[in-house]
Amino acid sequence: MNIETLKVFRDLYDTGSFSKTAELNYVSQSAVSQQIKKLELVLKCKLYHRPSGRISLTPGGEKFYEASKKIAAMYDGALAGIRALGADRDGEEIKISTIYSAGIYMIQNYIKRFLAQKPGTKISVEYRQFSQIYSDVTSGRADFGFMACPYLKSPGLSMLPVAKDEMVLIAGSSSPLAGRRKIRVRDLDGMDFIFFDKVFPSRRHIDDFLRSHNVKCRVKMELDNIETIKTAVASGAGVSLLPRSAVREEENGINLHVLRISDARFLRPIYLIHSRTRELSRAARSFMEIFPGVKPEKAGV
């Protein structure tokens, strides 16, 4: 599970309202309900009950609420401190809107490399749903967007491939696959899988890969983020296909096991998105140069 899910859980109890929680977290009311249900599925206990229409916590929910509140507060405090440091600098600001998996596991490395060269620049990173990234860049809310497997093209946006994630099979420590390092594509046939929701571009990319190799699997769960999928895999609910970069070294071999696909090359493309109608700042143009082979396009081109 990720920090956004914890915030949704915390805000639902604090506000007592699905609509207010949705507004605070920039998601729909149905998305709030879905995240709570998936939390209960992963934690294997009921967190809320609603007597007479009022929202209240179960005993398990009370314990989880206290933990969620502390973690969210620490996270918010850390962000505030980082932003305060950035505000004291005279450099320009670069605003980035990214899907969680690309931002946490891959783009951060490029940001660190850039800041080593341009330490006076402030970079703000916001983790967003893939569908929000297009509007963020188009509206100017963000200078750049990062996402995997873009599902549509826009004449006002430039979409540049900047990286590729190797897709691997991950299994839990109790799985018979735990002692293996590689697996063939045909061996995936008939396995119990935990996937991204169907609306996600990465899910479509995975479905296309399996279909092209005539692999048919059983879909046990469809979840909305990588951390929740990893938690479900670790619990023994099934296996999953995820980017290799999403599994940290301290996780591999402990509660999760990574198996590379031995007889097929399965990569997930990561794209940098920026507006073709707005001129990029000098700092933003320098940031693009961090990515090999990528050159900023002039506005209006």
Image (spheres, rainbow, N blue to C red):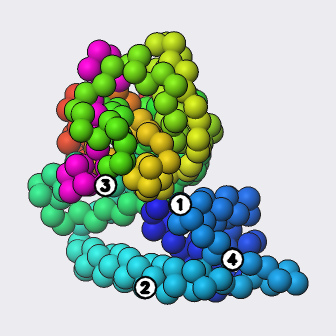
Is residue 47 highlighted in magenta?
A: no
Q: Which mark is residue 48?
A: 4
- The Cα atoms of the two marked residues, 4 and 2, are separated by 19 Å
Q: Which mark is residue 42?
A: 1
Residue placed under numbered mark 2 in the picture: 70
Tell me which label, 4 or 2, sits earlier in the chain. 4
Tell me which label, 1 or 4, sits earlier in the chain. 1
Which residue lies at the image location 31% right of the left edge and 62% below the top edge? 123
Tell me which label, 2 or 3, sits earlier in the chain. 2
**What stretch of residues is rendered in magenta?**
248-266
| Residue type beneath disc 4 | Tyr
Q: Which mark is residue 255?
A: 3
Residue 168, x across and y down, in percent: 33, 33
Q: Is residue 248 above or below residue 240?
A: below
Tell me which label, 1 or 3, sits earlier in the chain. 1
> How many badges with numbers are in the image?
4
| Residue type beneath disc 2 | Lys
Residue 179, x across and y down, in percent: 24, 38
Q: Is residue 227 above or below residue 156?
A: below
Judged by depth in the image, the label closer to the viewer, 4 or 2, is 4
Is residue 253 highlighted in magenta?
A: yes
Residue 199, x across and y down, in percent: 62, 39
| Residue type beneath disc 1 | Val
Q: Is residue 97 above or below residue 43?
A: above
- The Cα atoms of the two marked residues, 1 and 4, are separated by 14 Å
Judged by depth in the image, the label closer to the viewer, 2 or 1, is 1
- The Cα atoms of the two marked residues, 1 and 3, are separated by 15 Å
| Residue type beneath disc 3 | Asn
For mark 3, does the 10 Å Cα neighbourhood hold few (<14), some (14 to 19), or many (20 or more) residues?
some
Image quarter (top left, top right, bottom left or bottom right) of the C terminus: top left
